[in-house]
Image (cartoon, rainbow, N blue to C red):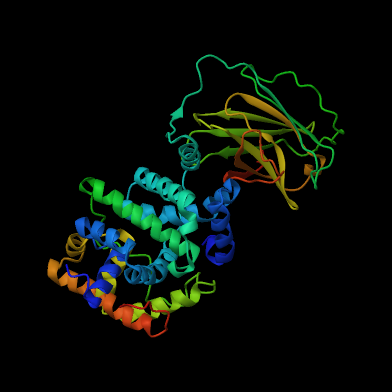
Amino acid sequence: MNYQDAKLRRMLAAEYVLGTLRGPARRRFERLVRADAALRAEQHFWEARLGLLALRSPPVTPAPTVWIALQRRIQSGNTVALRKPAAAPPRPVPMRRIWAGMAVAAAVVVAVVVSRQGPAPVNPPPVAQVPAPAAPALVAQLKIPDSTLQWSVRFTPGGEMTVAASGDYPQLGAHSLELWWLSPQGPVPLGLLPVQGEGRMTLPREMAGGEIKLAVSLEPQGGSPTGKPTGPVLTSAAAQAA
Amino acid sequence: MSSANAEPERLTQLLAAVGSGDQRAFAQLYEACSAHLFGLLLRILQRRDWAEEALQDCFLKIWQKSETYEPARGAPLTWLSSIARYRALDLLRMKRPEVEMPEEGEEPPLALADPGQDPVDGAIEGEGLGRLKDCMRGLQDEQRRSVLLAYYEGYTHQELAQAMDAPLGTVKSWVRRGLSRLRECLEAVGAVPQTE
């Protein structure tokens, strides 16, 4: 093809961006455009304009595993696969996080204990007593889209919350899943979610009363370093009467 | 529509931060744009697993090359859409023989006969989109339909001929005349690159 013909050059750039330029001609255009600023300008002209059509395409939220796999590819070049929970129960891992500097809920201690053996003894954190709500127990189901991983969250009258994980979970690499209370003032961290077994968290006092909305975000290992979500929000749900 | 449309400035800042290796900015960029790009990829690739693969490839490229973004290539989301589409077209080239054609009669999402119903109209990119829509309306029906099918479905000339039940040569000329007319119309508002 004669790449000196201005009209033809325009058309090739247009069809390249539109996508109808295929096969060897497409590869050839890609080679030529690198060294040809005018041709590149043509390409950019169409990208900036036809690309506006993309805004009309309905958005579809991808599965969280895509983000997790992407992170792993960036770090190691490997891909990730879903795996089942190990056959042998893992050693119980106590995880305790102290949320300092929280603007909303001051002096709240969140403790999460993961265990395969049901509720495990918890070192009682020094929290103030929350008045037992007269309302029936609240529950929430948090499900990660396009995976079987989900958590049943149950609020107990004593101001505590139990979290039971079920389903297959993605290898998280250097990541943790963090649970948030979406308070009227913004997200408040509740603790790291177990990917299997059951966990227990103490609720911030401010949480008593009103509608309770929860969200799960993907965070660096150990949780968000800022006290606010830093990774994508994978799922959210509102608590309802059991 | 997600907030990504309304925040090209924020996205530009995120892209700049990603270029300097800021992982948190990368996560925010992903959060803001992934659903848009995934929707686009699903439409072209028709398979969720391929679209997921393409979305990963696309963001990997953004992670590595975000510093190559320049405003001449459009607003950030527009540019990201180009990267996503190019990746999808490459994947189709490798995998297309397995792809089945979508059902006939499926229309592209751009309801051109319905001006004023566009949720993006009020956004910052609305002006450019409004102009594009005006120019699209100036095309003959077949020209417009072939351009939109090629854009949204990633069709080749052959696939367009099949979908539109017309000879290959006719379809090629619809696409080319459509693009020529579109360019003349878009040129009228300036910002045309210098050629030769």
Q: Residue at x 56, y 48 (%)?
A: B21
Image spot of residue B94 (x, y percent): 25, 47
Q: Residue at x 27, y 51 (%)?
A: B92
User: Which quarter of the figure has residue A209?
Assistant: top right
**Residue A133 or residue B63, whichever sits in front:** B63
**Residue A156 or residue B171, whichever sits in front:** B171
Residue at the right extreme of this rendering: A128
Residue B68 can be seen, yes or no: yes
Residue at the top extreme of this rendering: A88
User: Which quarter of the figure has residue A37?
Assistant: bottom left
Residue B107 can be seen, yes or no: no
Quarter containing the C terminus of chain B: bottom left
Q: Residue at x 74, y 53 (%)?
A: A184
Q: Give the vertical position of B185 relative to A71 (above or below).
A: below
Image spot of residue A111 (x, y percent): 74, 29
From the viewer's perspective, tell me whether residue B34 is left or right of residue B177.
right
From the viewer's perspective, tell me whether residue A228 is left or right of residue B188.
right
Q: Give the vertical position of B26 relative to B8 (above or below).
A: above
Image spot of residue A202 (x, y percent): 76, 32
**Residue B106 or residue B140, whichever sits in front:** B140
